[in-house]
Amino acid sequence: MSNVESSSSAVQQPPSSTLPLLGDNQVTMQASTSTAVGVPLDTQSGEPPAKKQLLDPNAASSSSGSMSGAGAGSGGSSSSTGTHEKLEYRLGGILCCAVCLDLPKLAMYQCQMGHLMCAACFTHLLADGRLRDQIATCPNCRVEISKSTASRNLAVEKAASELPSECQYCNKEFPYKSLDRHEQHECQERPTKCKYFRIGCQWRGPFHETTEHERNCLHPQKSGYEVMAALEAHDAKIKEEKKMFCTLIDLLSYEKIIFNDLQMKPYRTDEYVHKLFYETARFSAFNQQWVVKARINNSQRDPHQSNERTITYQLILKTKTSTPMSIHFFALKGPFSDMKVSTQIYKHDFTETSTESDYYLLPLPDSSANCSSECNRLLSNKGINFRLLMFLLNK
């Protein structure tokens, strides 16, 4: 029995005297190989870790799980916070308008395929189609869009109103539905005029600096002669408004006053380049037949390539008259119209040889951006409804 145990121990661990001796070349080769590979072997299987992961998927999953666990222990909370922040911005990118890439301020429309367009871009596309004499199409899928085929997406409007949006003045984030109120009335960085601007102060700065500026403003200490230029400009504006008001009151005293609720419809000229114009049906006033005609951007060749758009109109006498007629007229919003137009009175003397007035500007909102937006909204309709007031001066 003792002989068997000694022989087995000899097989398992041979004495150093019985190991074969390696030559110099073999020792050098073994050293270079281990140096080049440089991969530690696993103590149990004798395989490199990478090979062991390929052979044993459980080992790979456990090692990756331990790594992710260690990472979560150090920065897991910041990662989850970053995910929530990114989700808000991602929703803003998904719910934005496909044309201007901005969240809707008013209404959000969608085509039959579900692509979103804000109200301003939707009316702009319809207006462009009208100016080009083409069918308006969705910029994404090219399906036809119109006020009858497109629909409002109330869910997107409500979701977009709750998303955070950055204030353009203080760079803080607020819900989109309250952003306008914040920028106009609450933001401490919103641009504000000095209260002495009527006497010539040109300062314009953030709201929180207004009190300090007004305390040190030099304009209240100026003499009357120095502030006269600013006061004269202000008085000129007031005088113009007063003149129009007095003219309107004077016109209301005329014996012959008439108004008509009209609708202008779109037509095309017979020229090589068909230009868009609007025209009403004939209507009666002062025992004569009249027509109102309008054009876009003074019949510009390609008005759809311009972002600034205006409407001008003229009054045309369609019947012959033997006596001159001095007519005052102006357009305003009628009972069947939602047109935003200011009051501007025009005058023309109609005679047998002068049956058409000049083209006069339809006074839409003051700023160019609002004017173009209102013009696009009118062009997107099938017709332009308005009320025309006419006054005849008896001579």
Image (cartoon, grey):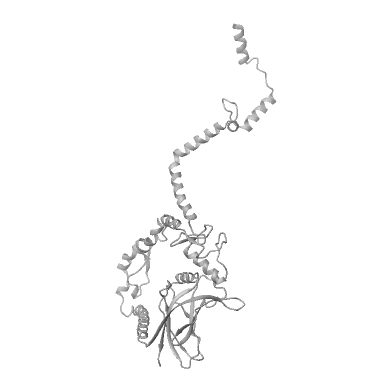
Which residue sits at x=70%, y=26%? 25
**Near-viewer residue (131 or 363):** 131
Residue 170 location, quadrant: bottom left
Where does the image place residue 267, in percent across and percent down from the top left?
A: 55, 76
- In this view, 171 is above or below 24: below
- In this view, 312 is above or below 112: below
Which part of the image, by quadrant, shows the C terminus? bottom left
Where does the image place residue 393, in percent across and percent down from the top left?
A: 40, 89
The answer to whether one can see residue 176 in this image is yes
**Near-viewer residue (224 or 328):** 328
**Near-viewer residue (268 or 309):** 268
- In this view, 64 is above or below 253: above
- In this view, 177 is above or below 304: above
Where does the image place residue 126, in percent across and percent down from the top left?
A: 52, 67
The answer to whether one can see residue 14 in this image is no
Which part of the image, by quadrant, shows the N terminus? top right
Which residue sits at x=30%, y=73%? 220
Where does the image place residue 356, in percent across and percent down from the top left?
A: 50, 86
Which residue sits at x=31%, y=68%? 214
Which residue sits at x=61%, y=8%? 4
Q: Is 332 displayed left or right of 98 in the figure?
A: left
Q: Is 210 displayed left or right of 277 in the figure?
A: left
